[in-house]
Image (cartoon, grey):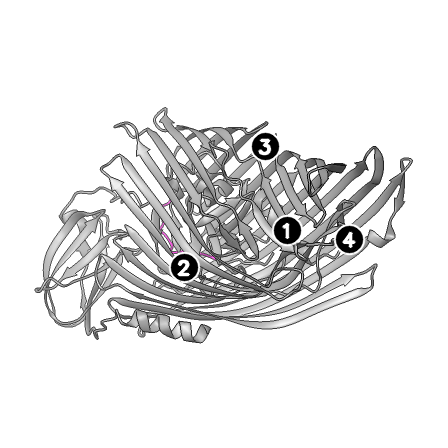
Amino acid sequence: MIRKLSKIFLFTLLIFFKINVLAQSISGVVMSNSEAGIKDLEVIAISENQQKYSTITNEKGEYEIKLSKSGDYTIEIFQNKDKLLSENVNIDNDLRKNFSIAAIKNIEGVVIQYQKKLIERKVDRLILNVENSVAATGGDALDAVGKVPGVRVTNDNISVIGKSNLMIMIDNRLVQLSGNDLAEYLKTIKSDDIKSIELITNPPAKYSAEGNSGLINIVLKKQKKDTWNTSVKSVYHQATYPTGGVGATLNYNKNNFSLLTNLGYSKGKTAPVETNKIFYPAEIWNTVNRRRDLSDRFNAKIDLEYKSKNITNGIKYAGIFSNPSILDNSSTDIRNITGDELSTLDTKGEADIKDRLHTFNYHFIYNFDEKGKILSVDFDLLNLNSKTSRRFSTVSEGDYLQNSLATGNQKVSNYSVNIDMEHPLKNHEINLNYGARFSFIDTKNRYNHFDIANNILVENMGLTDNFRLKENTQALYVSANKKFVSPVEAKIGLRVENTQLEGNSIYNNIITKNNYIKFFPTFYIVYSPDEKNSYSFNYGKRINRPAFDALNPFRWILSPYVYSEGNPSLKPSISDNFEISHTYKSLLISTAFVNFLKNGFNQISIIDENSKVSQNRYLNFINSYDVGLSEILNLTLGKIIATNITGAVFYSHSKSYIPETPDQLNGWNASLSISNDITLNKAKTIFLNISYNINSKGVDNINYVSGTNQLDATLKFLMLDKKLTASLQLNDILSSNRPEYTTYSNGIKYTFRNYYDNRFLRLALTYSFGGKLENSIQERETKNQEEIDRTIK
């Protein structure tokens, strides 16, 4: 099936291709009056019959345009649609010609300033330029990720419409966290410090193959050369309860040295509500858990980097010190099918958590020559120490059913080495990229369960466990990028990953091993017949490995009738992703996609009708596919309103191969998102964003999902010569983003709806000041490629 579809996609794409052999070219450098190359200029060659060939100058101002025939051409150079130069040239063979902008315009220093579009489409990724987004200001990285078209953030969980299992990178470094740990980490990053967010649904071979639906890469802002900048920030967040935060950032960049430091602290409380209903044949169990989640978090970050002529050395450290706590107040109302009350269960719990996360990176970059041959080496260390203590009791009709204490201590250490080589082959016009990655992960989990009677703790050895998990991965990859003819560019890659996993349940004396080698091919081809249209096709194979908590067999008791446990026998899932897209003038982006998932896993509730016990367990149980279409429309109405409209519709088919769930589930899903940025004054210091999202009812794996909608508004002010930024955000104004999921377990209907206090008001103030550093050594800027550092969760 996959092979047939890939042939159909390739055949469809190649219908559009008109391939001409190009025999000559014009190349050179576009320079300023100081003879410095100017980047990001559009260079166009126009033939006598008005056929156009174009390119964009690189970091050094270099350009190269391949032409189909010799003859007279007009060379035009543009900066943000402003024509800077027009000159006639005769091109017989390959011609080397430099252009000086100073001869046309007196641009001192030639500072290229232009407003990037809010949404951009590249060959392998969709980019949200956060620095141009009103809606993303004043929040954190988790807020900003939710503004990316096609991405959902529901109850702090990130997903892509039509896909699942998304991985997060920060500056091309994979974050080895998942679930609540990942959400807490993203909340420590200010959205104002983010330059852009890249959604890479089919990542190239150089990136880790982890994540069935691809990667999100959060690109942080870089400090300008020979400048310093300091910013202080305060945030007031009002949901059901208030939360406050303060932070400060210092950036320093002079000569060969750069420094970035960041400190932040936040404390507050939210009021999540978790509800579920179980429809037994003779009874209905309705549970409502009104939680109180208290946060207390301090984070620190420091980056140091030193650049010489060809060598860059840098170290990065980030630490999170968090002491959250959770208060449970769960009530279960049990009635018969006629509505008569039978009994009630009340569970109260208090969990205290202590998390300490440390990450360290050392990177080395060597620039061999001016042609872009670059070696990058990264060494990374992660250390996580998480301690949890939860005391809880369940009472029914005044009698204690359970009174217990559970404690846990998880220690995770990860060491990884990444080697990456960018290797252009000038003669063959091929850009090679190859490298290797070695990752070593060791996680130790100690969990104890105590029953409490007359305030005396008695350890329950049947529920106590000491679990150790080791996972080592070695990866090799290679990819090649080539422009075959002027309108056609292709990229192909292959990544191979060898994984050894061993889990040891020491108290139960059970050892689980899983060793495997997987190959992950990727392929991209782009056809751009003119300046207005671009067609692309891409394919990628991905893997999703279980998180450590999903593999841990310890049984975490929530009440006498509900418990959760991991599964050390859980296997990774594999997905095949196909996409074909068309971009028209960056205004309209149309994408058709097909995704196949094999051996998918998730946590499911297995309900026993007789004992009324719900077991939440991770299982491999599903194969599925999704096929759909998405549209992104960018509109600019004069100089006042910029509108982004994103819509998607897809058909989902899921088939389960375990008896506890329905055999299969099919259905359609649709979503629509409208975001409007409005400039409210001529000075461009007051901005308004109004956003509305709507999701139809549909299906998610073997669950039915209700429809939802959400209305947001953000008001942004720039004051004191734009040094002070104030933003007021209203999130989920109608409190209408409350999806309900319906599924069946052993033939028993089960519904749940969780709401995590998403309606809130947020006021953020940021004051920034800084300036230029004098007496700096003027050094030629070195072209550095993005270094890679990827580790699995």
Q: Secondary structure at mark 2?
A: strand
Which part of the image, by quadrant, shows the C terminus?
bottom right
Crowding around mark 3 (Cα neighbors within 10 Å: few <14, some 14 to 19, many 20+) is: many
Residue 250, relative to residue 575: is it above or below?
above
Residue 245 visible, this orientation: yes
Disc 4 target residue? 610
Stretch of the chain drawn in magenta = 777-787
Image-based side of 410 in relation to 305, left or right: right
**How far apart are labels 4 and 3 at the CA level?**
46 Å
The numbered mark, 4 or 1, whose residue comes first in the sequence reads 4
Name the outermost residue toward the top: 720
Disc 3 target residue? 266
Disc 1 target residue? 749
**How far apart are labels 2 and 4 at the CA level?**
42 Å
Q: Name the residue type under label 1.
A: Lys
Closest to the camera, between mark 2 and mark 4, is 4
The numbered mark, 3 or 1, whose residue comes first in the sequence reads 3
**Within the magenta stretch, is there residue 784?**
yes
Q: Name the residue type under label 3.
A: Ser
Q: How many marks?
A: 4
